[in-house]
Image: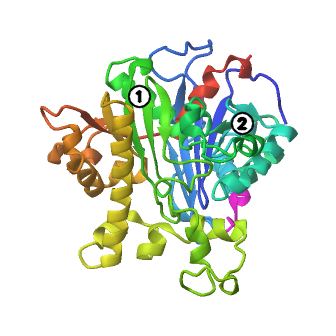
Amino acid sequence: MAEAPAPRTGLILSLNSGSSSLKISLYRLTSQTPPEADAPGDPVKLVLTSAISGISASPTFDFSIVDPSAIKKDARTAKDDAAPDVHDHTTAFAHFLDYLKQEADIDRDQIVHVCHRIVHGGDYYTPVIITEESYHHIDRLSDLAPLHNGAALSVIEACLETLKQANSIAYFDTAFHHYIPRHISSYAIDQDIANKKGLHKYGFHGLSYAFILRVVSRHLQKPPADTNLIILHLGSGASICAIQNGKSLDTSMGLTPVEGLPGATRSGAIDPTLIFHYTHKAGRLSHKETGERGVGVTQAEEILNKQSGWRALAGTTDFAAVTKQRETNPAAQLAFDIFADRILNYVGAYFVKLGGNVDAVVFSGGIGERSVELRDEIIRRSACLGFAMDEGKNKGVRDVEGEVVDISAHGGQKKVLVCRTDEQLEMARQCALEEKFWL
């Protein structure tokens, strides 16, 4: 395991571990001289992308070359190829490394830094090189992000074993929200216990929010420090963030990613006592001791993380399917309406918290970038706040290239934008700009 600066001729690998997926991007530096943080353009260039999906079910493999000049031969691309040798995140990463060597002729020794997206960083607020200490720190936090931290640790272990010449560097989704004011991040519980156990709002999707803030402020031709946004990161895991003067003021997720919006399998915010009634033996509300039983933390987390959301409501984790089935399936309509209602709760609250001084509302994430119907629903019902959207632009988002697409209606008081977020690029960019990581 390397813990030393690397030559600027080396490659950066960015890894984004989901609960049943692994997204991979490989980058090279655009210059052999240290870049300036505020220089135009990105300090890295994408060489190739890869993804392994359905790791826990029927794994498929994608591999695509973006910069042919950076590889030694014509590589065979892959799209939804079966990957029978993949059984978990460790074997998924091994499958990628083998393909990288065989098809792109890129030796693993050329990789000098590996950036890992870690959902929960606890009290880590800056990227850290993985050491025994930091590894165990992340491991201890796995219970707070059970859908992601464990998967990321599996890939970290594989990197430490197979890429011993490279630094494995952890980038934390929670770091972006470090400056949320204490009265917003604190829960109304005994503060001695809260401080001792680290029980407060951490917030997540921070790498995505950092990317969106940077590219949207550039699109608006404003310094990030002067930019106020309401950002909707909507995917199978969904959250919303209020950005004030370039910093996170508030966000919907809390101590864990369960708080806030519902997702594909997450419940979102609920009455905290609901879980006890949900698992109640009597099957109805009761205060009799004979009708009660203990609910373990693991059981509660399993229900709220994996047995809820639109899977529980509509029988699918595919929000596109939920949207298509609305007219014929009341359960799908309910799932769509609940999601839209909870989003509106936060849009309204954050608009007030920002005093109405909002440069734009920004849709991002898989659902935010693709769901014409959900964007229409949210903006139509937010018209009282001054948001207006062009119907034609909304339907044509997929046909417009670039990181930011403006779908605002002509004459609207507030901007409505779609941003194609890129967490892997954000990690690689931060890595390239960190002088201590390079010779």
At 45% from the left edge and 21% from the top edge, which residue is drawn?
41
Q: Classify the position of the C terminus by image quarter.
A: top right
Check disc 2 and report the residue beneath it: 123
For the residue marked with disc 1, what is the amino acid?
Answer: Val
Check disc 1 and report the residue beneath it: 215
Residue 29 in percent (x, y) is at 59, 24
Alpha carbon distance from label 2 to label 1: 27 Å
Magenta residues span 84-91
| 166 lies above or below 380 | above
- In this view, the residue in front, 319 or 189, is 189
Mark 1 secondary-structure assignment: helix
On the question of residue 111 being in view, the answer is no
For the residue marked with disc 2, what is the amino acid?
Answer: Asp
On the question of residue 290 being in view, the answer is yes
47 left or right, relative to 113: left
Mark 2 secondary-structure assignment: loop
Q: Residues within 10 Å of mark 1 (few under 14, many from 20)?
A: some
At 60% from the left edge and 36% from the top edge, which residue is drawn?
72
At 60% from the left edge and 55% from the top edge, which residue is drawn?
18
